[in-house]
Image (cartoon, rainbow, N blue to C red):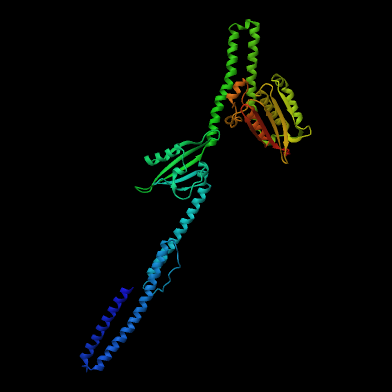
Amino acid sequence: MHNRWHQSIRLLTLENILLVLMVLVVVQHFSPINWSTGVVGGLLLVLVLVAVVETSIVWFQQRERQKTIDRMEAKLRQMSSQQFPPHILLPQTDPLYSLSQAVNQLESYQRSQTRRAELQEKELMMIMRYLPVGVMVIDHHRQVQLSNPAMSELLQESINTIAHTYTKDIQLYALTKLIEDTITTHKNQRASITLTPAPNTQVVEATTVYIQNSRAHFQIVLMLYDITEVYMIEQMQDDFVSNASHELKTPITAIAGFTETLLSGAKDDPETLDQFLKIIADESQRLIDLIQDVLSLSRIRAQSTTKLVFKKIAIRPLIETELAVSQQAIARQHLTVDNQVNGDFQATVDQRKLSQIIKNLLTNAIKYNREGGHVTVKTTATENHWSLTIVDTGIGISAEDQQRIFERFYRASPSRSQQVVSGTGLGLAIVKELVTAMHGDISVASQRGVGTTMTVTLPLDEVISK
């Protein structure tokens, strides 16, 4: 402003001198001037007065204009730092009016774009927060720029919001290799990765997306989708086919083999005939039991809760009935059975389904017990629920097997095979379905070589169905 002011003074002075000279020339042409000291002094005084007046006017205009320019500069600086001061208002006659309008329009546009960007960022963060897929953004420096809570949950790590190397959060080799392959090949990658091994298996589908921002800058978006349930279902399906085939093949092979032997001439020996026919009958019964169990599961799945018939009954008589049926097996293994259920205890249940639950659990407690062992049956009750607990001192179940014993056809073969116990592997699957149908829950606590505790928890006063 100082330089512009000096330039304006010089121009005004020159302008006034030229104007006075022109006036003197014109006056001298029409009427010669009698020059004297007074005349010259008067002219100089007039010249000085005119210069002072003009200078004052110009100085005031320049000062006001400079104030407006300073306001515009300050406004532009504030806009660059995401601050939005009020609009600059000028009269239309002001030389800077058009410039002020342009600055105001620019500020309005930037304010609108900033608000839109903030809204989009909030929406994005809200989506990221509740997105069930784990998301992590890694830049070209291998620094984590963004991640969501799902990623922290899957990795079981608290991810810092400040930029840091991704290896601080991801130590699993398969996952780091997937990221490094993406950086090396500049191509998207996908793989199924086991984050946590058995027994608490957790499997994810990991996908990386390579985004090239510029020649030297890129980003990698890592997404983890939990497919543990799908993986477990596929594994169960494979096991189901394998186990079902095995369970069907064994009795059919035995029946076919002994039948062929009889037809080959063994039927002529009465003792051999009776022995083989008994084996064929046993294997046939095993097939019948298998088919009945499969049909039972299908019927349970097909029936809705409206098919349940609830009534209030005493629990102890049901247990005594099932123990009486199993008395021969109990005596054969010299087991001690302690029925601690109070004779007065009653609950609202579906009697037929509860009888089947008790039968299957007692059968397992007897079948997989050791000779001379104990079986204890007891009930407990709270305000709204009651529990039936069956404890045995048998061979027990490993922690890994406990995760899967309620699957169809699944049998804990390492421990069961040592007992040479026959079965379809459907008993506990049926129990699980029956308990779920009655709005209850079943849990297992077991230790190899010590025994197993099965606990069924059901509502104490279930609403009686139609």
Question: What residue occupies the far right of the structure in this picture?
Answer: 344
Q: Confirm whether residue 206 shows in the render.
A: yes
Give the x, y percent position of residue 131. Answer: 52, 46
Question: On screen, 147 above or below 280?
Answer: below
Q: Which quarter of the image is occupied by the N terminus?
A: bottom left
Question: On screen, 246 above or below 185?
Answer: above
Query: Left of 284 or right of it: where is 31?
Result: left
Residue 87 picture quarter: bottom left
Residue at figure coordinates x 48%, y 36% from the top left = 193
Residue at figure coordinates x 65%, y 19% from the top left = 285
Give the x, y percent position of residue 20. Answer: 25, 86
Question: What residue occupies the far top of the structure in this picture?
Answer: 268
Residue 300 picture quarter: top right
Residue at figure coordinates x 60%, y 9% from the top left = 262
Q: Which quarter of the image is occupied by the C terminus?
A: top right
Query: Left of 20 or right of it: where is 60?
Result: right
Give the x, y percent position of residue 263. Answer: 59, 8
Q: Nearer the viewer, residue 210 or 309?
A: 210
Give the x, y percent position of residue 236. Answer: 56, 30
Q: Confirm whether residue 466 shows in the render.
A: no
Q: How many marks?
A: 0
Query: Left of 121 or right of it: where is 60?
Result: left
